Image: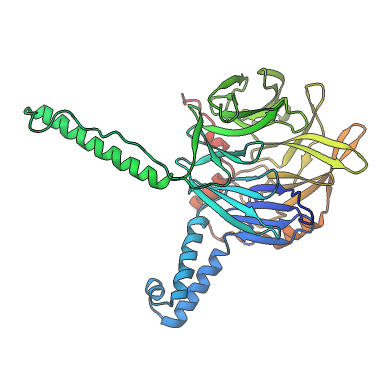
Amino acid sequence: MAGLQHPFQCLQYAKRNSQGVFNLLIAAAGCHLYSYDATNGQRLDVWPQDVESTVESASDAVATADGDAPPEKRRKLSPASSDQQEKQVASNKSSAGTTIPLLVISPDGKYAIATTGEGKTIRVFELSDNGKFKELSSRTMPKRPSALALTPDGQTILCGDKFGDVYSLPLIPGEYVRKIVEQPNIPAATPLTVHTKGNLRTLEMQRLQAEKKAQTAKQETATLNFEHHAIIGHVSVLADLISVSVSGRNYILTGDRDEHIRVSRGIPQAHVIEQFCLGHTSLVSKLCVPSWAPELLVSGDTDGNLLLWDWRNAQIHRNISLEEVLQSEVMVRGIWDISLEQAASSPVNVILVSLEGSSQILCYTIENNALRAQDTIQLSGNVLGLVGIDQGYIVVSVDTVREPGSTETWKSSSGALLESFQINLGPDGPKCVSVEDPMVATINAAGTRDLPTALSEKQQKELNDSLYNLGNMKKRSNDD
């Protein structure tokens, strides 16, 4: 498998409103974030910095000073400057051992919010005028995040986890000290007043439980010492969430493993449930409220159903079974609302749908509260991410490692990381045409990071699961 490049699992477009500041394409490949100039594809920054080269350079410098001593001893005998370098290497190692499954850009394009899978950490980066990453905060959540969104004002992070809880966190954390007020649990009885063996044993158990509770509270104070509020709770895995504003009111929509779409009020009344949208038959994998029609909702599940809703009234406008259309078992992976301004025509509004382990993108328009199918877009590899760029075209991230249509069979060499398509509005509807974009060509030429030439079966499975996990989240026939 020589020559394999790690694909981009996340893709976001940072459109900035400041005069003289260029727009950015932000992408995540494995455990790294990449920043590109959206006009020419020039790579501007990588986070974290090259861990492998940092480790090698530190090791080489120490080896020169200390000969053939073991690596650990060489580091101990290195100069003080090497100590600082080792701390940076250790910090990079902790970040590099994870993937970045979730990536969100603030509405003004000034901030990037990313999560690291294994570390359960939400990191907020400021995007400088020259496209550099500046890490502003790092907050470790109690459970691993499974969904991430921003409120419409862009000031609050909404984080959902696989235990069904949704937390709110300020985008820019201020000073905060978590105070846990514990009432001392002092039993009325004492060893001087209790004499039987059974009562003494009960009294000892009460003492041990009180000590354990105090220790747990102390640990939580240290690990969750930042402002966070639990605002919504599900009883099953939370797969996706979005926050929308309609007619001056904010709402939070969440989809879970129990086929439910819950419509809750926005902060600070997120505990108030407006209604449930019921109609799916399996895990609700993706939610999308079109920017040009906020009263509508497009949702998909792991049974291949695509539904169009009047979500404020919990009414289904259209239910499309993609398994019947495609004559195969499919799971909805991504749904994007693309509204692109074109110089000589009206905006192009389309709904694009990707499927787990598929190299096709399904295209729909919304007409008279119904989804109308358009031409399917064919790519060279499985679709991982998608983003709309100005001037009427989209950029798609494809899987460079696995064969098209498969989530397990690996290629012998990598193809293009990104592909671009122009969306044109014709008399019969939108048409997507493959185009050669200079930005995409530059990014493809630079590549990401080489994958090891020899991977064990376990390592391959871990990489497969990091990109394709809907099957693991879906209910089995023997699940309750």
Tell which of 295 and 424 is nearer to you.
295
Q: Measuring 74% from the left and 61% from the top, which residue is drawn there?
A: 42
Image location (x, y in percent) of residue 173: 53, 46
- Give the residue displayed 58% in from the left and 63% down from the top: 49
Q: Position of residue 351 (x, y in %)?
A: 76, 33
Q: Quadrant of the N terminus?
A: bottom right
Q: Is residue 141 left or right of residue 254?
A: left
Q: Is residue 129 left or right of residue 212?
A: right
On the question of residue 7 being in view, the answer is: no
User: Could you say where residue 328 lies in the image, as x and y percent from the top left?
Assistant: 67, 31
Q: Is residue 429 visible?
A: yes
- 429 to 393, vertically: above or below: above
Quadrant in the picture for residue 217: top left
- Say which residue appears at 66% left-offset and 52% top-offset: 27
Image position of 96 (left or right of 402): left
Q: Position of residue 123 (x, y in %)?
A: 55, 50
Q: Is residue 83 left or right of residue 277?
A: left
* Front-lying residue, 217 or 64: 217
